[in-house]
Amino acid sequence: MASNRLTPLAFRKLKATDEEQTISDGGGLFIRIRAKTDGGMLTFRYCYRIDGKQRWANLNAKTLSDARQERDRIKALVKSGIDPMLEKKLEQERQRQKQLQEQAELARLQSLITVNDLFERWAATDLQNRKDGGKEIRRMFEKDVLPILGGLAVADVRKGHITEVTDKLLLRGVNRMAKLILSLMRQMFRYAVDRDIIEFDPTASIRKAKIGGKSVERERVLSEDEIRQLKSQMPNAHFMPTTEAAIWIMLSTCCRIGELSKAQWQHLDLEAGVWTIPSENSKNEKPHTIYLSRFAIRQFEILSQFKDSDTWIFPNRNNSNHVNEKSISKQVDGRQNPVIHRNRTAHNEALILSGGKWTPHDLRRTGATLMGNLGVLPDVIEKCLNHIEQNKMKRVYQRQELRVEQAKAWKKLGERLELLTRANQGNVVTMGQRKMA
């Protein structure tokens, strides 16, 4: 083999001729030189025997040194009982199968809809039927859900992906929001199950109680002493007069903050002392009439002095729509949290009351509790709150409006608030408090 081995000089002198040449380099390695008429190309081949049969392997080498190294690698394979040509064919088949699998997976992924796609489909068919057309849910998903899940195929979403969303919310300290978004994600994935988009709901095994702890129903009610506190501390909050009036309206009418935020001047008749909340503004989609006390009318009169819109009682900054429903809540919260809101307002302790943190919705519960303390019957209070009767039989057969009784209830509440908020409160006796559900 050594005697046949070409020297570098002999290799360089190899030239194509009119005939094809096969030149041995020893050890089974051959150099093949095509005839001039066929292009004169130089290639390398290795001849070996396996299982008693002669085989030829075409080498990919470009230089004699590379050819010798490739020859030695093949020789080692043959020595271990591996047919390099068969192995090459098997490797080609493996690569072909891998490529087919990759193409099939790509086609599968392209055929699957993503969570972004699912959300848009859900929004178009289900969310558009909600009162706001799904705008608030879209805002929440675009902020907290879709940045994490949006690009995933719906079929690939697992429990861990869902908890990644809720864990980020829990780290922000918004536990109730984490529970709400879990509930909304569950609605969306159940929608996908119902339409055979996926077989299983990835949220099914996640208990809401495990997300941020067990939900506790709020029972916060401002005492009469706290209402006095609120009156005396309100100037220190440096609210706009319209915000201050809104707080007293919520307390004296037991309305929801969303109902007040969306209120229009056309819904209000101060001469008759009536505020009509249309069905599209009420939580239960039932129209509601509030018979205003003198106390409540005076707050609306304050609002009329700062009237910036012919349509909205509480307009947004450019008067194009009503104010954001969270605006008042954020202002109230900002006056009770000196740590979180230390950089937002200089008055971040102005509305801290002796009973602890309170929200605008607690004013609705407080107003109802005051009515109860003043002797108003529970059925009348429920009507004032525009609650739907839970007992089906009562709901069907007892349709009385109790309008006169409601008007008297709001009048009693207004008169009590007049006493509690007047400048000289020294002679006002605080009533015992009975919490309303």
Image (spheres, rainbow, N blue to C red):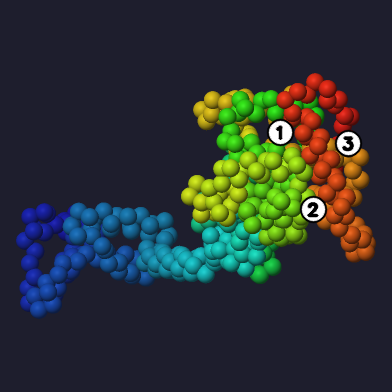
Instruction: Say what amino acid the circle numbered 2 marks.
Output: Asn
Q: Position of residue 154 (x, y in %)?
A: 58, 61
Nearer to us: label 3 or label 1? 3
Question: Which residue corresponds to the image point at 86% horizontal and 36% vertical from the top-left?
Answer: 435
Could you tell me how far apart the alpha carbons at marks 2 and 3 are, in whole angstroms? 19 Å
The residue at which mark 2 appears reads as 386
Q: Nearer the viewer, residue 118 or 238?
A: 238
Q: Position of residue 175 (x, y in %)?
A: 67, 40
Residue 338 falls in which quadrant of the image?
top right
Give SS at disc 2. loop
Give SS at disc 1. loop
Could you tell me how far apart the alpha carbons at marks 3 and 1 are, in whole angstroms? 20 Å
Q: Is 12 placed above or below 225 here?
A: below
User: Quadrant where the N terminus lies?
Assistant: bottom left
The residue at which mark 1 appears reads as 358
Instruction: Say what amino acid the circle numbered 3 marks.
Output: Asn
User: Quadrant where the C terminus lies?
Assistant: top right
Asked whether the viewer can see residue 255, the reply is yes
Q: Position of residue 44 (x, y in %)?
A: 22, 64
Disc 1 crowd, CA 10 A, few/some/many (<14, 14-19, 20+):
some
Question: Which residue corresponds to the image point at 64% horizontal and 57% vertical from the top-left?
Answer: 266
In the visual, does 89 lie left or right of 151?
left
The residue at which mark 3 appears reads as 373
Q: Which mark is residue 166?
A: none
